[in-house]
């Protein structure tokens, strides 16, 4: 095991895969000469050259479409979006082409393309640059949605995503890039569609992904001081969702709290809550609870922004409510 | 499986439906789409069609009857289905003014006895040991039975029990009757910890939000404020009892204040006792009649029974049977008060207060008037044992029509017990005293026992109460009556 930063883990994943398969190329804004807007692609231009690492103009509709076309003819593109807020500019390409071409062509085309980039809030980036878009992308059949929470998951999942023959929405928590974490030495991958218990427990299940995993773990620590043992489960892949592991956990604990940075209406948490409610009906001691981002455009002001993101005190209060301990 | 059909809401504005005419008779087969009845709404006469295949097993109302939407009007099922419980349930719902549709089935229809709210046991505990000074369990102050449903429980109103799905499943697994559990969740919802506590007979309390401080003594400023009235006993914050996975056999330690006072969180049983007793004392107009019983003949009778049959009868056994016979002779006293009527009970079911650890429970001897004194003695002994082991089933400690509480073996001369609603009366029994008495105008030595009948004045007036007491005294003073 060795310790690397989240961005470095992503860099290693891309470099290792590009080394092995020269159909893989990286394309996006600032990925080459600037070494990446967030330095995720640092050193890749130098190592692989301009055919494999391509800087684009600010034209998401364009280069996302190019990625889709390239995948259709046999290449394996990694398309970087500077943030997922800008994916809306390429919405038609992603929703109507990437998600559907395989089915509409009767399987004549597969699209082994990874669309990756940072998502979620950072600090005072305000309404148009702080969005969690996974609920929107996970709604569309034909797309996979993957969200790593730590360096180990980031590298393993990105490698699997690159090797997968489907169009994949890969959302990296923007404020996680500097997080340090241990990763295994040597070659490893983490399968898509498999959740992980990040912390075992028995009194309630806290489900969180990406940035919320850290909040969930801190919440579990706070609850442990009161003798409450929370189990933290990270789906890792939003779509396809590892429903079995989530259900197994809630059947064991009888209570479920979902932490989600995105908006509540039609959020990923709503889908999870439905599935848990349905499969664990007779096992629940309380209705499924969720804490989400505030149902409004993200404010610019720092203090207001803090209020709009799920935090540990609120998660602890919700957990205690589940246990009828308020 | 048979089900109840309710008066349907055939149009948006209708509140009452008039069943003008049944189109199917009891016993007829019904196919989906066939017309069961013609129902008149505020606008027109409409057809009430069947949704399911089945047989119309019972028509609950007749042609021309008008009832509110949601009232049960028929039972449909398969030929041969036993629908007695459904009929009870339908009648109960109709009587309760069912304005809601029969969506979720309420708690399964119970036999009449179980439908009575759990009666309140005597004011003082009674062991069943004989009077002659056998060691007796220490008594707890106020009465009631463990986990009896309080008379106005939020979790079990109008037959519908609010419980989380997990609590329901656990209740089935652990053999707990949800109707007897007090829920600590929102709206009185019964949750997992309530069922677990009930299964243990109230040994573990549902945590009270205000009674224990969840935080350690020192907290960082700006975190949630300490709400408690009592600090934790240890800084190591012991696990809340309901979260311990293995069953604890001992109650969790009560925190001790610096003054030395011990805070004992209320167990389910204690809370039930408190609620029931308060209700009895504040809503039932009690009055008390006391008599002294000449127990010479009774003590002689016990001796004879011991010699001839080798069976030990306690004084309490004699009292139980005497009360049962009195209830049979004076049925007006074997009754309960309800808003519109006094209900005279058909059966004589005598409750017998038994002291148990941390409280009191009142097992019931059913049809006590029809049982022999020997049978009563046997049952009383057996149930008292199981009561102390907390192994009584809810149907064994609910539904008495009259209760007896005996503190004689604790040296109590006389006392007045608190009635268990909805019973009409309760008899408190004191010790048998050997004392100077007047016999044939001379001073002699005799056995006297003081008994006090507490009566609900809404059901039993002074004269009737006196008649009851006279009957009991008469039977005890002529114990040959106990042979009948």
Image (cartoon, rainbow, N blue to C red):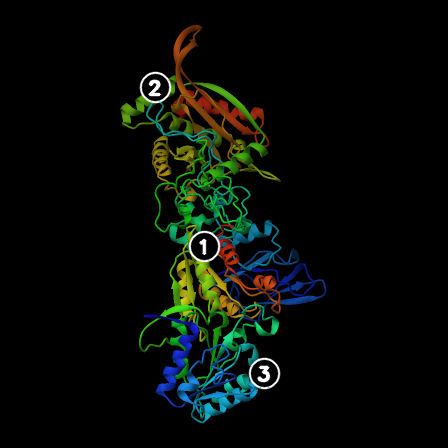
Comparing marks 2 and 3, which lies closer to the viewer?
3
Q: CA distance from mark 2 to mark 3?
A: 103 Å
Q: Secondary structure at mark 2?
A: helix
Q: Is residue B79 visible?
A: no
> Which disc number belongs to residue A222?
1
| Label 1: few (<14), some (14–19) or many (≥20) C-alpha neighbours in 10 Å | some
Q: Secondary structure at mark 3?
A: helix
Q: CA distance from mark 1 to mark 3?
A: 41 Å
Q: CA distance from mark 2 to mark 1?
A: 71 Å
Quadrant hosting residue B132? top left
Residue B268 position, x and y percent, is 46, 42
| Label 3: few (<14), some (14–19) or many (≥20) C-alpha neighbours in 10 Å | some
Q: Chain of mark 1?
A: A
User: Mark 1 and mark 3, same subunit?
Assistant: yes
Counting the numbered discs, the total is: 3
Nearer to me, A38 or B320: A38
Give whichever of discs 1 and 3 has the lower sequence position: 3
Residue A158 position, x and y percent, is 41, 78
Q: Secondary structure at mark 1?
A: helix
Q: Is residue B386 visible?
A: yes
Nearer to me, A287 or B420: A287
Q: From what the image shows, is residue A166 above or below residue B41?
A: below
User: Mark 2 and mark 1, same subunit?
Assistant: no
Residue A115 position, x and y percent, is 48, 82
Label 3 sits on residue: A89
Q: From what the image shows, is residue B103 above or below residue A100?
A: above
Q: Chain of mark 3?
A: A
Q: Chain of mark 2?
A: B
Q: From what the image shows, is residue A140 above or below residue B279?
A: below
> Which disc number belongs to residue B300?
2
Comparing marks 2 and 1, which lies closer to the viewer?
1
Residue A233 position, x and y percent, is 42, 65
């Amino acid at each position: 095991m060795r310790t690397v930063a989240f961005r470095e883990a992503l860099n290693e994943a891309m470099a290792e895969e590009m080394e092995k398969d020269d159909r893989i190329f990286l394309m996006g804004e600032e990925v080459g000469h600037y070494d990446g807007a967030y330095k995720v692609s640092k050193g890749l231009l130098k190592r692989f050259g301009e055919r494999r690492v391509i800087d684009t103009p600010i034209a998401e509709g364009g280069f996302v479409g190019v990625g889709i076309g390239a995948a259709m003819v046999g290449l394996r593109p990694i398309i970087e979006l500077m943030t997922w807020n800008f994916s809306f500019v390429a919405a038609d390409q992603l929703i109507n082409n990437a998600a559907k071409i395989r089915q509409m062509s009767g399987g004549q085309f597969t699209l082994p393309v990874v669309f990756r980039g940072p998502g979620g809030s950072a600090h005072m980036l305000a309404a148009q640059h702080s969005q969690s878009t996974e609920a929107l992308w996970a709604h569309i059949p034909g797309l996979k949605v993957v969200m790593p929470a730590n360096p180990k998951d980031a590298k393993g999942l990105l490698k699997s995503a690159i090797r997968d023959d489907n169009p994949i929405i890969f959302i990296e928590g923007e404020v996680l890039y500097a997080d340090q974490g241990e990763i295994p030495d040597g070659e490893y991958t983490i399968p898509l569609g498999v959740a992980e218990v990040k912390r075992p427990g028995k009194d309630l299940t806290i489900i969180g992904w990406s940035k919320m995993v850290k909040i969930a773990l801190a919440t579990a620590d706070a609850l442990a001081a009161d003798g409450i043992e929370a189990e933290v489960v990270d789906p890792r892949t939003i779509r396809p969702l590892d429903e079995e592991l989530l259900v197994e956990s809630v059947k064991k604990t009888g209570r479920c709290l979902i932490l989600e940075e995105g908006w509540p209406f039609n959020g990923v948490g709503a889908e999870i809550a439905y599935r848990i409610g349905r499969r664990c009906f007779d096992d629940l001691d309380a209705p499924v609870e969720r804490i989400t981002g505030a149902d409004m455009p993200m404010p610019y002001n720092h203090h207001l922004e803090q209020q709009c993101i799920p935090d540990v005190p609120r998660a602890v209060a919700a957990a205690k409510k589940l246990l009828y301990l308020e | 499986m048979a089900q109840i059909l309710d008066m349907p809401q055939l149009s948006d504005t209708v509140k009452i439906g008039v069943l003008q005419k049944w189109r199917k008779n009891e016993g007829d087969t019904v196919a989906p789409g066939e017309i069961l009845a013609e129902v008149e709404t505020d606008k027109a006469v409409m057809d009430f069609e069947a949704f399911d295949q089945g047989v119309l097993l019972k028509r609950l109302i007749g042609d021309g009857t008008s009832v509110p939407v949601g009232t049960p009007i028929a039972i449909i099922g398969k030929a041969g289905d036993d629908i007695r419980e459904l009929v009870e349930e339908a009648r109960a719902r109709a009587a309760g003014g069912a304005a809601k549709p029969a969506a979720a089935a309420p708690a399964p229809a119970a036999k009449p006895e179980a439908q009575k709210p759990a009666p309140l046991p005597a004011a003082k505990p009674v062991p069943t040991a004989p009077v002659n000074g056998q060691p007796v369990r220490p008594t707890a102050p106020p009465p009631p039975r463990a986990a009896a449903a309080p008379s106005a429980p939020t979790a079990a109103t109008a037959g519908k029990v609010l419980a989380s799905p997990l609590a329901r499943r656990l209740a089935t697994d652990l053999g707990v009757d949800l109707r007897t559990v007090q829920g600590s969740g929102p709206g009185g919802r019964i949750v997992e910890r309530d069922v677990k506590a009930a299964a243990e007979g109230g040994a573990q309390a549902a945590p009270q939000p205000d009674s224990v401080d969840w935080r350690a003594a020192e907290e960082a400023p700006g975190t949630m404020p300490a709400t408690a009235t009592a600090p934790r006993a240890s800084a190591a914050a012991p696990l809340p009892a309901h979260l311990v996975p293995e069953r604890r056999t001992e109650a969790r330690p009560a925190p001790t204040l610096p003054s030395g006072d011990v805070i004992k969180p209320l167990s389910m049983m204690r809370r039930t006792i408190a609620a029931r007793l308060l209700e009895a004392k504040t809503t039932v107009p009690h009055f008390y009649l006391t008599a002294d019983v000449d127990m010479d003949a009774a003590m002689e009778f016990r001796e004879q029974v011991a010699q001839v049959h080798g069976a030990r009868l306690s004084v309490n056994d004699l009292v139980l049977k005497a009360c049962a016979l009195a209830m049979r002779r004076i049925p007006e006293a074997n009754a309960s008060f309800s808003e519109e009527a006094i209900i005279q009970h058909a059966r004589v079911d005598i409750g017998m207060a038994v002291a148990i650890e941390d409280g009191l429970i009142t097992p019931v001897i059913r049809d006590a008037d029809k049982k022999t004194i020997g049978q009563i003695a046997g049952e009383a002994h057996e149930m008292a044992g199981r009561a102390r082991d907390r192994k009584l089933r809810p149907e064994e400690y609910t539904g008495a029509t009259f209760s007896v509480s005996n503190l004689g073996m604790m040296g109590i001369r006389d006392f007045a017990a608190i009635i268990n609603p909805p019973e009409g009366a309760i008899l408190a029994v004191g010790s048998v005293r050997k004392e100077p008495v007047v016999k044939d105008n001379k001073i002699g030595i005799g056995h006297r026992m003081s008994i006090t009948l507490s009566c609900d004045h809404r059901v039993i007036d002074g004269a009737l109460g006196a008649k009851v007491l006279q009957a009991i005294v008469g039977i005890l003073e002529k114990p040959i009556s106990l042979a009948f």
